[in-house]
Amino acid sequence: MSPRFDQLKTEILNCHRCNLSQTRNHVIFGEGNPKAEIFIIGEGPGKVEDLQGRPFVGPSGQLLDKILAACGFTREKHVFISNIVKCRPPNNRTPAIEETQACLPWLHEQIELINPKIIILLGATALKNMAGNNYRITRDHGQWLNLCNRLAMPVYHPSALLRDPRLKRPTWEDCKKIVRKYQQMIDSGHYSPFIKEE
């Protein structure tokens, strides 16, 4: 882990760039392998995350962990998880433009330091903030994009799957594409018990 990574974490945990710093309990830096080949980007912390100081530990996070496990991935080895904003927007509202603009430079530096080969965008907020407002999660999920000179794929946010279980099937199809790309680019021997070799 680079000295800058530790320094960046200290800077982010003490950030007061936007008004979210006034209502948060914790800044959520992110977690996972700092040398991960997969970088997962969500929208922002929810209530449980704000209380615990960790990303994706509420109901959406529990579902995300199940999805990762089905893909043969773990937080500790394969992925690093962060968000568009590091502090919880009150009442879990969508982050405001000034909040995302204040926080995105942190995220971009995390991506540069971790240097993943694959980026996963969870939901509309992550997709629009990273790829542009002309993208739509309902239309563009499962499509490979070029982002920060890396391959990126938007998929439905786990919270959307909890609201509408019909989205689970297309999300699993998208995840299979990610696993196969991981096998092609990073580890040909990577194994998922739920994905048959083509």
Image: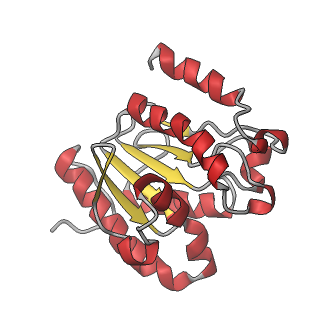
> Where's the C terminus, which quadrant?
bottom left
Residue 16, position in %: x, y?
74, 32
Kindly identify the residue that appears in the image at 48 percent across and 33 percent down: 110
Residue 160 image point, x, y percent: 58, 74
Residue at (28, 54) in percent of width and height: 191
**Residue 21 or residue 35, whichever sits in front:** 21
Q: How many marks?
A: 0
Q: Is residue 184 visible?
A: yes
Residue 31, image quadrant? top right
- 177 relative position to 34: left or right: left
Please indicate, yes or no, whether residue 188 appears anywhere in the rendered image. no
Q: Where does the N terminus fall, quadrant-wise?
A: top left
Q: Is residue 79 left or right of residue 181?
A: right
Please name whichever residue, 113 or 188, is drawn nearer the observer in this view of the structure.
113
Residue 129: x %, y % from top left: 50, 55
Left or right position of 111 against 161: left
Q: Which residue is pictured at 80% across the width and 46% down the height?
A: 51
